[in-house]
Image (cartoon, helix red, strand yellow):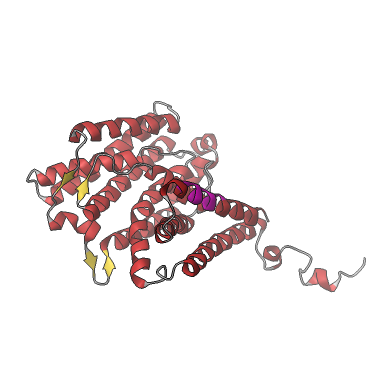
Amino acid sequence: MDRPSVKQEKGLGQPVGIALGWNALEARERWARLGLALTFLGLCIVLSLLSPRFLTPGNLMNVVRQTSVNGIIAVGMTMVILTGGIDLSVGSVLAFTGVVAASLVTGGQPPVLAMVSALLLGSLLGIWNGVAIAYLRIPPFIATLGMMTITRGLALSYTQGRPITGFPESFRWLGAGWVGPLPAPVLLMALVFGLGGALLSYTVFGEHLRAIGSNPTAARAAGIPTHRYLVLTYGWSGFLAALAGLILIGRLDSAPPTLGLGYEFDAIAAVVIGGTPLTGGEGWLGGTLIGALIIGVLNNGINLLNIPSFYEQVFKGGVIAAALLLHRALRRE
C-alpha cells in the first residue's frame, strides 16, 4: 500500500473544519456563525465610514436600546420557529396588551398591577394560539394570522383609534429607566436572552423543541408531550410580546393602537438571519441576537444617512437578503 502523502497526513486535502477535528455538521455551523459575525462587523465598518456619528457612544447605546424591543420578541419567535411554527400575531399582541396596560394605569390602577395584567393577557393570547395549533390542528400561519387581525381590531376598538398618554414615571421605568450606566431595556433584553439560552442549551425543553421541529411524528412516538410544548412555547411568545410592548410604551410615553405594525416581520428576519431556518429543528439564540443587532444597525444607519422613506424598505430588504445569501453560502461551504 502506498504511503499517504504529506498533504494527506496533515489534513491539507480536507476542508478546514474537518482538518481541525470538527465533523461536517460542526464545521458547517462554525462557518455559518463566523459569516454572520463578519456580516455584522462589516456593516458596522461601512456605516462608520459613511457617518462619523455612528461610532459615538451615545449612538451605539441608542442602537442597543432600540434593538431591545425586537430582540425580546425575537427570543420567543426563535422558540416558535424551532418547533416548525410561526407567530404573526406578536406585533398586534404588543399593541393590544400595551393599550390595556396604559388604560389601567391612566385610570388610577397601580403601575405594577397594570404591568402584570398586560403580561398575563399576552400569555393567555399566546396560549390560545398554541391550543388552536396543537389541539384544533389549525396551521400556525392561519392561527396566528387570525390572532393578529383580532388583536389589532381589539386595540383599535378599545381606544377608539386614539393614543393613550400621560403615564407615571414608575410605569415608564421599563422603557425609560436606567440601572447605573445601562438602560433598563438593555438589561431586560440581556436577561431574556440569558434565560432563553439556558432553556435551549441546558434543559430537555430545548432538546424537545428541536425534536418537534425536526420530526413531530417521531417526537410524539418518543413520548414527548408535543401539544403541551407547543402551548407553552406560544404562551412564552405572547408573554415576551407583552413585555416588549411595556418597554415600548414606556419609552414613547404613549400607547397608540397602531403600535407594533410590522414588528413580527422584523422578529422573523432577526431569527432567520441568525441561522434558524423556517423549517425548524435547529437554531441558536446567539445568532438571533446578532440578527436583531443587524436590523437595529440598519435602521440606525438609514436614519443617519437620511435615506428617503420610500427607499428605506428597498435598502433594508437588500441588505438582509445579502446577509442571508452570504450566510447560506458559508453554511453550504
96 with respect to 205 (left or right): left
In the image shown, does 27 or 219 lie closer to the viewer? 27
In the image shown, does 190 or 221 lie closer to the viewer? 190
Q: Is residue 79 visible?
A: no
What is the residue that sits farthest to the left in this orientation?
Answer: 108
Does 150 sit above or below residue 323?
above
Snapshot quadrant of residue 10:
bottom right
In the image shown, does 187 or 161 lie closer to the viewer? 161
Residue 25 pos. (x, y %): 63, 55
Q: Residue at x 37, y 45 (%)?
A: 263
Residue 136 pos. (x, y %): 39, 26
Magenta range is: 313-321
Residue 108 pos. (x, y %): 6, 46
Q: Residue at x 23, y 53 (%)?
A: 252
Instruction: Tell me if residue 314 is in the magenta stretch.
Output: yes
Snapshot quadrant of residue 158:
top left
Q: Is residue 209 visible?
A: yes
Does 325 sit above or below residue 8?
above
267 with respect to 109 (left or right): right
Q: Quadrant of the N terminus?
A: bottom right
Residue 122 pos. (x, y %): 27, 41
Does 177 sit above or below residue 248?
below
